[in-house]
Image: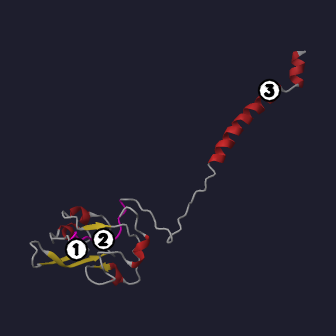
């Protein structure tokens, strides 16, 4: 008789449905927790891009607190550069014991961003900043130096304001 009732009442089916329902409820409840909207794209250029701290961008020459150029023309960066994109001419300034660069040219079109120049500088006078917008229409725009508004290596280019991170 029991065998007959077991065949009529599908107990095993109910046990299986209970087990399946339990797992479905667990998965459904965890799936609903992950309904946070994820932004896949950034709203560039309205929102500045966050870059990795070790990102290598455009070369920038630094000044000290008095506004003087930190470079002392040791030529270490010029000598170690594998693509020879740095050209330095040194000079003297009255009241300063060390040399100062009278001309510092950097050809960005051939730079491979290896950062050897930054590592070789013992005076921390040059860095590769976080500016990644390096496109230009003319070949002359890739040559940056100490003089000139468009070729100034002490500051950002006009489009560079979008690519700076908060850490700098």
Q: Which mark is residue 67?
A: 1
Which secondary structure lies at badge 2?
A: strand
- Left or right: 66 in relation to 36: left
Residue closer to the observer: 9 or 109: 9
Circles 2, 1 touching at the beta carbon (< 8 Å): no
Specify the farthest residue to the top.
1
Magenta stretch: dominant secondary structure: loop
Q: CA distance from mark 3 to mark 1?
A: 84 Å
Residue closer to the observer: 2 or 44: 44
The stretch in magenta equals 54-67
N-term mark: 2 or 1: 2
Which mark lies nearer to you, 3 or 1?
1
Q: CA distance from mark 3 to mark 2?
A: 73 Å
Q: CA distance from mark 2 to mark 1?
A: 18 Å
Q: Quadrant of the C terminus?
A: bottom left
Q: Residues within 10 Å of mark 1 (few under 14, many from 20)?
A: few
N-term mark: 3 or 2: 3
Q: Quadrant of residue 86?
A: bottom left
Which mark lies nearer to you, 2 or 1?
1
- Left or right: 98 in relation to 48: left
User: Which residue does the numbered mark 2 point to in the structure image?
Assistant: 59
| Residue 40 colored in magenta in the image | no
Residue closer to the observer: 111 or 103: 103
Location of residue 31 with respect to 72 vertically, above or below: above
Q: Quadrant of residue 62?
A: bottom left
Q: Residues within 10 Å of mark 3 (few under 14, many from 20)?
A: few
User: Which residue does the numbered mark 3 point to in the structure image?
Assistant: 12
Which secondary structure lies at badge 1?
A: loop
N-term mark: 3 or 1: 3
- Left or right: 28 in relation to 2: left
Could you tell me which residue is drawn at 22 percent across and 69 percent down?
65
């Amino acid at each position: 008789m029991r065998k007959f009732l077991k065949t009529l009442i599908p107990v095993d089916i109910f046990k299986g449905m209970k087990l399946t329902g339990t797992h479905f409820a667990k998965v459904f409840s965890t799936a609903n927790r992950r309904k946070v909207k994820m932004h896949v794209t950034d709203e560039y250029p309205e929102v500045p891009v966050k870059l990795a701290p070790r990102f290598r961008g455009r070369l920038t020459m630094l000044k000290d607190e008095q506004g003087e150029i930190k470079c002392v023309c040791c030529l270490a960066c010029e000598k170690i550069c594998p693509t020879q994109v740095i050209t330095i001419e040194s000079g003297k300034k009255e009241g300063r014991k060390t040399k100062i660069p009278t001309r510092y040219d950097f050809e960005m079109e051939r730079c491979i961003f290896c950062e050897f120049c930054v590592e070789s500088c013992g005076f921390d006078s040059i860095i590769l900043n976080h500016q990644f917008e390096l496109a230009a229409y003319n070949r002359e725009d890739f040559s940056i130096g100490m003089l000139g508004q468009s070729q100034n290596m002490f500051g950002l280019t006009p489009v560079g304001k979008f690519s700076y991170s908060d850490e700098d």
